[in-house]
Amino acid sequence: MTATDVTAETPIVAADEQIDTPALVVDEERLRRNLALMADLAKSHGVNLRPHAKTHKSPIIARMQLEQGAVGLTCAKLGEAEVFIREGGVRDILIAYPIVGEAKIARLLALMDEAQITVVVDSLEAAEALSRAMAAAGRTLDVYLEVNTGMNRAGVEPNDAVEIAHAISALPGLRLTGVMTFEGHAGSSPPESIADVAAAAGRTIVETAERIRAAGIPIAQVSVGSTPASWYTPATAGVTEMRPGTYVFFDNSIFRHGRIGPEQCAARVVATVVSRQAPDRAVIDAGSKTLALDPSRSHAGYGYIVGHPEAIIERLSEEHGMVTLPPGEPGFAVGDRVEIIPNHVCPAVNLMDELLIVQDGRVVDRWPVAARGKVR
Ligand SMILES: Cc1ncc(COP(=O)(O)O)c(C=O)c1O
């Protein structure tokens, strides 16, 4: 697989289109192509698509995903689910995050009146608290057991899974319906090993599901996630569901894997050059409150400036982006505009009130980022 030529890409907004910056623009055609790409990939793997909505936080995009066959959504937080259910009419959501604390359980119970909710658990403490609340309310909550397949974040160790699955399935008010893993470590591994790392995660989660079934617990769902691993993990026989999120826009972190190029990156930060105090330094009006602080393994700096592969966004203050320029780099006079592919598009979206929707270089619509800031 050869890496894509990032230098060939051009801006998605027409040079004479008026935009007040900084802004997050989305090319609608690219977005639609990305949605179709992942819907087709899920079909070719024979698995359900349950996209993670934390990337776009937009009920409009959620509806597009459901129209293309997604079985429901994944959310990290109850606050996101509340928006997608109440503003987007979504009826099936997996909360892929531990629900801990009485305030959250009360909100969860309210949401269960409005939609089918499944919750991830990875501890007996959290499961017992959910069980007590469900039993008291006369409800049954579907849960997936989260298993660590190498990300070393949440998730029980595979060897402990059968024991904890037994304990959970004995609790009143809970129904253990699946196992899940987030194999995000595959995407951060070197490009040449992503397929092997993802496949290993796939084997581990499927084997774990089989051991749980062999112990007499009839779980149906085996859920995996992560955009960079989408070509690999869900191909494992026995996986039933995939949860990619970033694919709707893609970002600067995925170039290095070679499959995706900047021409598939649908979301761009548009920024204006606001200061030029040194020949090798331009300042743009996108700082950490626009681009977010995530590093990239694909391209140096805090984002890829389309058409300027040698210009590096070296430092960020809150509202200033300091760009180091090679000698004679054109396009960085005060007032010039640049388009940046964010390193990590999800936090960048979360910093914006709206997405400016672009067709053929023109802004044609504004979609609210309705679930922005919903971190509770
Ligand atoms: C639990 C879970 N599932 C799925 C995803 C989606 O992964 P990606 O952003 O690589 O598409 C994430 C991302 O953080 C996640 O945390």
Image: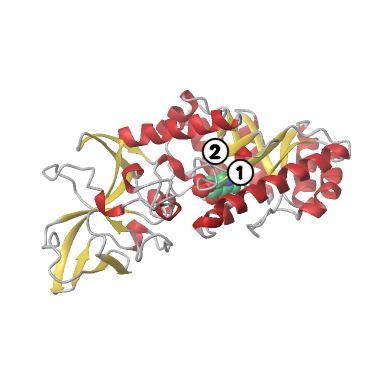
- Residue density around tag 2, few if under 14, some if 14–19, many if 20 or more, within 10 Å: many
Q: Residue at x 15, y 72 (%)?
A: 327
Q: Residue 328 lies in what quarter of the image?
A: bottom left
Q: Can you tell which mark lies on residue 213?
A: none
Q: Estimate the x, y position of residue 296 in percent, counting from the top left.
A: 42, 61
Amino acid type at mark 1: Thr
Q: What's the amino acid at mark 2? A: Ala
Q: Of the numbered discs in the image, which one, if any, rests on residue 81?
A: 2
Q: Nearer the viewer, mark 1 or mark 2?
A: 1
Drawn side of residue 116 relative to residue 44, left or right? right
Q: Mark 1: few, some, or many residues within 10 Å (few <14, many ≥20)?
A: many
Q: Is residue 277 left or right of residue 315?
A: left
Pointer 1 residue: 233
Q: Position of residue 66 (x, y in %)?
A: 49, 27
CB atoms at circles 1 and 2 under 8 Å apart?
A: no
- Residue 18 position, x and y percent, is 14, 44
The Cα–Cα distance between marks 1 and 2, rounded to whole angstroms, is 26 Å
In this rendering, would 187 be left or right of 325? right
Q: Does residue 142 appear in this view?
A: yes
Q: Quadrant of residue 44?
A: top right
- Residue at 78 percent across and 31 percent down: it is 138
Q: Looking at this view, is 203 or 72 the one in front? A: 203
